[in-house]
């Protein structure tokens, strides 16, 4: 796969980022290793994870995804070939969202230990903690960059107001600025990114890595009825978005996929890739045959009419 710049960084990433939330959750260690081998064979060089993955699974305490990725990189000896992204700030037992200096500095050391590396390429504030001033969070990130534990920093799930404030604080206080923003964004859920956040990202050339790019599988074509939804590993998200609008979006995606002789997932991913502000969608898979859609999406050229049709049905 062709490698593209990630925003204003020097990082060159594949057009698709693999989401590591499945490691230690819907994939065990052996299956995760097989998937990691498959995605690198495909040309995907960027992996997105977080300290909190997969804390929600019974018996897990968090960090399972990082541990698996770290063990795999160690066994394969390929750390230098991977653009590694992880996050901190979600509840890891501290009682809520926390991007304070104390928590961030503790979290990076724990993540590096699990990942069996001495640095990460991109370190995100996973969610905004409005009780912590941006000066404190960015000051902690400045120290981590100086210590070469972190190459670049990113923000996820911030409001437009708080993102802009953080960028202004960086500018006037000689603190590092966020280089990448990670929003939820797909054909079904566009409002969390379009508008204020998108405007800021384009204004200052932030890289944009979208999560839930396939709407938790809704855009893959595997859900055709309420019965299918009940068997989903993400039943709450899927149920929340299962309505007439979603059904019309799926119908349109399926029609365009048929005309190109590709999978519905490829069309949904390609639409995200065609969005001017987006650097790369984050997409997960639980079976190696799902990776065909990634390969299709990376080379699929949607027509202007098809893009407009998708824009209109999902507006």
Image (cartoon, rainbow, N blue to C red):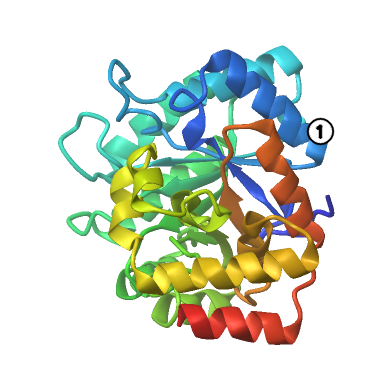
Out of 20 and 118, give the one closest to the viewer: 20
According to the picture, the residue beneath numbered tag 1 turns out to be 41
- Counting from the top left corner in percent of width and height, residue 41 is at 81, 33
- Counting from the top left corner in percent of width and height, residue 244 is at 36, 72
Out of 248 and 279, give the one closest to the viewer: 248
Residue 134 to residue 195: above or below: above
Q: Residue at x 21, y 59 (%)?
A: 130
Q: Is residue 278 visible?
A: no
**Would you identify the image quadrant in which residue 303 lies?**
bottom right
Q: Residue at x 50, y 37 (%)?
A: 49
Q: Residue at x 29, y 36 (%)?
A: 103
Q: Is residue 8 left or right of residue 239?
A: right
Q: Is residue 59 left or right of residue 254?
A: left
Which quadrant is home to the C terminus? Answer: bottom left
Q: Is residue 117 visible?
A: yes
Out of 311 and 208, give the one closest to the viewer: 311
Residue 117 to residue 290: above or below: above
- Counting from the top left corner in percent of width and height, residue 43 is at 80, 41
Mark 1 lies on a secondary structure that is helix
- Counting from the top left corner in percent of width and height, residue 20 is at 53, 35
Residue 314 to residue 82: above or below: below
């Amino acid at each position: 796969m062709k490698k593209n710049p990630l925003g204003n960084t020097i990082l060159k990433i594949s057009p698709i980022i693999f989401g590591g939330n499945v490691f230690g959750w819907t994939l065990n260690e052996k299956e995760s290793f097989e998937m990691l081998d498959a995605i690198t064979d495909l040309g995907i060089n960027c992996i997105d994870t977080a300290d909190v993955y997969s804390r929600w699974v019974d018996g897990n305490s968090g960090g399972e995804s990082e541990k698996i990725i770290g063990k795999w990189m160690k066994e394969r000896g390929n750390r230098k070939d991977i653009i590694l992204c992880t996050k901190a700030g979600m509840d890891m037992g501290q009682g809520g969202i926390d991007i304070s200096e104390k928590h961030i500095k503790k979290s990076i050391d724990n993540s590096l230990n699990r990942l069996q590396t001495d640095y990460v390429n991109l370190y995100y504030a996973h969610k905004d903690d409005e009780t912590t001033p941006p000066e404190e969070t960015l000051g902690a990130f400045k120290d981590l960059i100086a210590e070469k534990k972190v190459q670049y920093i990113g923000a996820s799930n911030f409001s437009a107001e708080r993102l802009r404030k953080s960028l202004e604080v960086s500018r006037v206080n000689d603190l590092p600025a966020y280089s990448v923003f990670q929003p939820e964004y797909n054909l079904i859920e566009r409002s969390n990114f379009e508008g204020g956040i998108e405007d800021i990202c384009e204004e200052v050339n932030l890289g944009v890595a979208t999560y839930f790019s396939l709407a938790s599988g809704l855009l893959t074509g595997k859900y055709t009825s309420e019965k299918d939804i009940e068997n989903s590993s993400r039943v709450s998200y899927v149920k929340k978005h299962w309505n007439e609008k979603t059904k019309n979006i799926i119908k349109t995606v399926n029609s365009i996929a048929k005309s190109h002789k590709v999978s519905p997932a490829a069309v949904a991913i390609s639409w995200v890739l065609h969005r001017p502000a987006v650097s790369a969608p984050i997409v997960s898979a639980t079976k190696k045959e799902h990776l065909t859609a990634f390969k299709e999406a990376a080379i699929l050229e949607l027509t202007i009419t098809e893009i407009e049709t998708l824009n209109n049905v999902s507006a």
